[in-house]
Amino acid sequence: MIYKDLVNSLINWFEPKVGEVTFGDEGQVDVTSITDFPLVHIQPVGTDAKSGYALFTFDIYILNTKESLEDPIDVLDAMSEIAVDFASFYYSGDSAINDMPSADIVYDQFGNRLYGFKFTNIQFLVKTVVPC
């Protein structure tokens, strides 16, 4: 349940801050059915198990529609607040961001004129052995 617990903690962190949180392959996101923006999409990338801990890697998109605000700069400004909060404050018990990557600006993501940020290969270190 380590992986599922981490994914659920990520979803739970983002849900009160955005309109929708999706998980899975970015190619499977149906943005035509999403009506509540901003959108956070969590895409699994891989895992690396070590003795006593595991590294789980994700790409995380923090996006909004250009149409939701009058200016793309306003969209990026609003999404940057969520990205900075996430980068600065995410820590949950036995899991934490191992090494925070920079976030790239993305445009027209998922073919729906979505703008925002993408954290690429963000790693979460999760303890798998609890000392006695």
Image (spheres, helix red, strand yellow):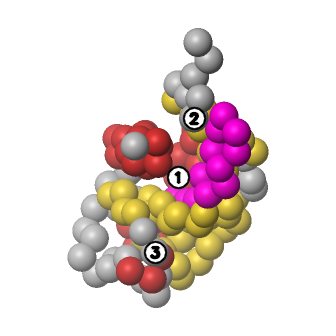
Compared across the picture, whether 87 is left or right of 42 comes to right
Instruction: Give residue 46's position: percent from left, percent from top.
Output: 60, 63
Q: Is residue 26 above or below residue 122?
A: below
The answer for how far apart the CA atoms under marks 1 and 2 are is 36 Å
Sequence-wise, the earlier of marks 1 and 2 is: 1
**Amino acid at dot 1:** Ala
Instruction: Give residue 128's position: percent from left, percent from top.
Output: 57, 35
Query: What secondary structure is found at the residue carrying circle 1?
Result: helix
Marking on residue 128: 2
Name the residue carrying label 1: 78
Crowd rating for badge 2 (residues with CA inside 10 Å; few <14, some 14–19, many 20+):
some
Closer to viewer: mark 3 or mark 2: 2
Please tell me whether residue 13 belongs to the stretch shown in magenta: no
Crowd rating for badge 3 (residues with CA inside 10 Å; few <14, some 14–19, many 20+):
few
Sequence-wise, the earlier of marks 1 and 3 is: 3
Q: Residue at x 50, y 65 (%)?
A: 43
Crowd rating for badge 1 (residues with CA inside 10 Å; few <14, some 14–19, many 20+):
some
Q: Residue at x 59, y 66 (%)?
A: 45
The answer for how far apart the CA atoms under marks 1 and 3 are is 25 Å
Asked if marks 3 and 2 touch (Cβ < 8 Å), the reply is no
Q: Which residues are magenta?
A: 47-64
Front-most of residues 24 and 111:
24
Query: What secondary structure is found at the residue carrying circle 2?
Result: loop
Instruction: Give residue 112's position: percent from left, percent from top.
Output: 42, 83
In which quarter of the view is residue 5 placed? top left
Closer to viewer: mark 1 or mark 3: 3
Sequence-wise, the earlier of marks 3 and 2 is: 3
Q: Residue at x 45, y 83 (%)?
A: 27
Whether residue 73 appears in this view of the structure is no
**Amino acid at dot 2:** Thr
